[in-house]
Each structure stands twice: as C-alpha cells, then as structure tokens.
Image (cartoon, helix red, strand yellow):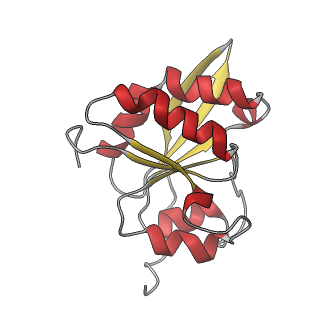
C-alpha cells in the first residue's frame, strides 16, 4: 500500500463519535480523501475486540485506540498484530488530553499517520504528547504465534 491509496482509519471508543465525524470532515480536503470512521459506525457500542477486529481484517483499515492492552492475547493491540492490522496506540500522555485536544493531536501529525500505511501490515505505532506536541513512533513487536483461522 502506498500514499496513492486513500487511508482508512477506524477509531475505537477512545474518542466520541461526533468528534471522529468532525476529524473526518476536517481532513476530507486531503488527497486522496481519507475515510476516518468511529467503530460504532459498524459495530454496536461495547462490542468486544475479539469480535470486531477479525471482521475488519481484510478491509484495509488501520486502527487507532487508547487501549494499550499490555497483557493478554485478547487485548486490542495483540489481536490487531495477530490479524496483521496496522494500529496506532495513544500513549497515556495523549489519553489524558481533552477530546478536542486529542482531535487536534491527530490532525497535527496527519502526514505521519498516513505514512504508517507504508509500514508492514500489523505494525504498531505509539502516539505521544510531549511539550505540547504530538509525536508518532514505530514500536518493535515481539514475534507472534501464527494467525488464527478466519
């Protein structure tokens, strides 16, 4: 996948649905036009990660979440890695921001977020907020078990 492909970014319940719609509208000027949607556009609120993540695995979405799921194979980051879905984790510094500040952080590093789609599928990135600025860095993942059947 390269920059000529429109980015498909799915945000989980870390941001409110109206704010995600606003981010989508704000970034709709970009070329190619991205698709930025809230998880609840497709699944009922509260749908468990092991239920929705496999369903989007073949649809080209990148996932952004505040769920860092440090332990457990049933946590969002581990499931995304298993299904080869590139994902961006909001670090604690971003998680404590107000909703509009999170939106501003996403918009401020939009070009870096788009570059994530050029990384190997299943890559993990960490979004941080340091000294009033958002940053994004790739995280090295431990080797994972083979992918479960779909």
* Quadrant containing the C terminus in the rendered view: bottom left
Tell me which corner region of the image, top left, top right, bottom left or bottom right, holds residue 131: top right
Q: Position of residue 149 (x, y in %)?
A: 43, 87
Q: Position of residue 44 (x, y in %)?
A: 67, 69
Q: Residue furthest bottom?
A: 149
Identify which residue, 35 or 108, lies in the foreground: 35
Using residue 127 as the reference point, say whether residue 70 is left or right of it.
right
Please name whichever residue, 144 or 58, is drawn nearer the observer in this view of the structure. 58
Residue positioned 48% across, 76% down in the render: 145
Which residue shows up at 71% across the image and 64% down it? Answer: 45
37 relative to 94, above or below: below
Report whether 116 appears left or right of 131: left
Q: Which of the pair 67/39 is nearer the observer?
A: 39
The percent coordinates of residue 70 (x first, y second) are 71, 56
Q: Is residue 105 left or right of residue 68?
A: left
In the image, residue 30 above or below residue 139: above
Q: Tell me what residue is drawn at x 26 percent, y 30 percent.
A: 31
Nearer to us in this view, 16 or 55: 16
């Amino acid at each position: 996948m390269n920059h000529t492909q429109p980015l498909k970014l799915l945000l989980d319940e870390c941001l409110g649905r109206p704010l995600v719609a606003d981010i989508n509208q704000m970034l709709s000027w970009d070329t190619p036009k991205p698709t930025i949607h809230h998880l609840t556009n497709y699944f009922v609120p509260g749908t468990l990660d092991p239920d929705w993540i496999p369903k989007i695995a073949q649809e080209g979405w990148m996932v952004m979440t505040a769920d860092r799921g440090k332990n457990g194979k049933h946590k969002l980051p581990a499931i995304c890695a298993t299904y080869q879905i590139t994902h961006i984790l909001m670090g604690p510094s971003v998680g404590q921001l107000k909703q509009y500040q999170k939106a501003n952080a996403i918009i401020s590093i939009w070009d870096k977020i788009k570059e994530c789609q050029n990384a190997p599928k299943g890559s993990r990135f960490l979004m941080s907020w340091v000294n009033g600025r958002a940053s994004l860095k790739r995280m090295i993942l431990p080797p994972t078990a083979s992918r479960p059947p779909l």
